[in-house]
Amino acid sequence: MIAPGTPLREGLDNVVGAKTGALIVIGYDEGVRQIVDGGFYIDCPFTPAHLYELAKMDGAIILSNDRKRILFANAQLVPDSSIPSTETGIRHRTAQRTARQTGKLVVSISQRRNIITLYKGNFRYALKDIGVILTKANQAVQTLEKYKSVLDQTTTNLTAMEFEELVTLSEVALVLQRVEMVLRIKREIERYIHELGTEGRLVSMQLDELVSDTEEEAELLIEDYCVNPDVSPKVVFQELQKLSADDLLKHSNLIRLLGYPSSIDIHEEAVLPRGYRILHKIPRLPSIVIQKLVERFENLSRIMVATIDELDEVEGIGNVRARMIKEGLKRVQEQVFIDRHI
Ligand SMILES: Nc1ncnc2c1ncn2[C@@H]1O[C@H](COP(=O)(O)OP(=O)(O)OP(=O)(O)O)[C@@H](O)[C@H]1O
């Protein structure tokens, strides 16, 4: 709503430049009406220039719910004074109380400090300088690149070991941990992108390029190793996101999410993948067919040794597709053995 590139932000930046300060309520309903005292009902179209001109007056400006019109200017706001506020100046106290009382987004621009602060309900956020956020976002992208390359190595190793039937829970936990680390940085960058608006286009493209399929890969990995095949990988994935940074470092926590008892020796416990993740690497193989394959053969090793005729028996697989699966798996295996880092 107020990211760079939006008309509202242009108006706010003009007010900051003019050093007039402002108090703006975004949205109007009965709750807002009750705390507006005096001022002018002007109901004019919203433009950045109108906002800037009207901010020269004392008092608050109130916009319509769709932000297309300026309804009031020079309004005195009288929110309930018993609502607690952590602010010191009167403008900001009023903004915080109004947001808490009405649930509307309230923007306060300090005249002396030129800071734009947002309030909504109990949430308070001071906008940061775009240059500062851009620097932070670029640093985060660099960190993401490093983490992603480690994740790629670990995943390649896991894939190679899956073909060799050498996977223990320890490798699975390691990849899961690395995936979540990468996704945590991704989520941080997404927050920067929201705040950067049009200025964040390049960062957004870099992010897409780096990690657009990481979430899907994570879910397939969970589907491959979750003890109970009926548990939705999305649920496990959400639990993974809830782990604290410290808990994420302990492999036993990750294995527990997959349904294994914490007493298990993760370095000893050999496991076989169902095969979802590797089968998804075969081009033009629909998910429903992959599902049927796993239901029939139970794990990747059995799929690997199945004959063309056996594959052919699965619903949705004819002779041509059976050959395609065999060749596809062979190609993935060859590629991963070339890429593997020992
Ligand atoms: N209840 C209110 N309703 C509408 N406008 C208000 C209200 N309280 C303060 N303002 C606006 O804020 C302006 C500045 O007030 P004041 O200096 O006390 O606040 P402040 O929080 O210290 O703000 P700043 O950091 O901009 O100086 C007032 O001139 C008025 O335009």
Image: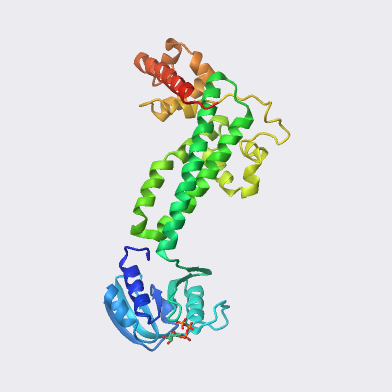
In the drawing, does residue 82 fall left or right of residue 63? Answer: right
Q: Nearer the viewer, residue 71 or 176?
A: 176
- The quadrant in which the N terminus is found is bottom left
Q: Quadrant of ligand 1?
A: bottom left
Q: Residue at x 37, y 16 (%)?
A: 318
In the drawing, does residue 1 fall left or right of residue 337? Answer: left
- The quadrant in which the C terminus is found is top right
Q: How is the image coloured?
A: rainbow
Location of residue 312 (image quadrant): top left
Place of residue 32 in the rendered image (x, y in percent of width and height, measured from the top left) = 43, 78
Q: Nearer the viewer, residue 249 or 27?
A: 249
Residue sitting at the far bottom: 38
Q: Is residue 196 above or below residue 298?
A: below
In the drawing, does residue 40 fall left or right of residue 91? Answer: left
Place of residue 237 in the rendered image (x, y in percent of width and height, measured from the top left) = 54, 42
Specify whether residue 66 is in view: no
Place of residue 216 in the rendered image (x, y in percent of width and height, measured from the top left) = 46, 38
Location of residue 7 (image quadrant): bottom left
Specify whether residue 154 is in view: yes
In the drawing, does residue 220 fall left or right of residue 17? Answer: right
Q: Residue at x 63, y 31 (%)?
A: 170
Place of residue 85 in the rendered image (x, y in percent of width and height, measured from the top left) = 56, 78
Location of residue 132 (image quadrant): bottom left
Q: Nearer the viewer, residue 83 or 190?
A: 190
Q: Is residue 3 above or below residue 218?
A: below
Total marks in image? 0
Q: Residue at x 39, y 21 (%)?
A: 316
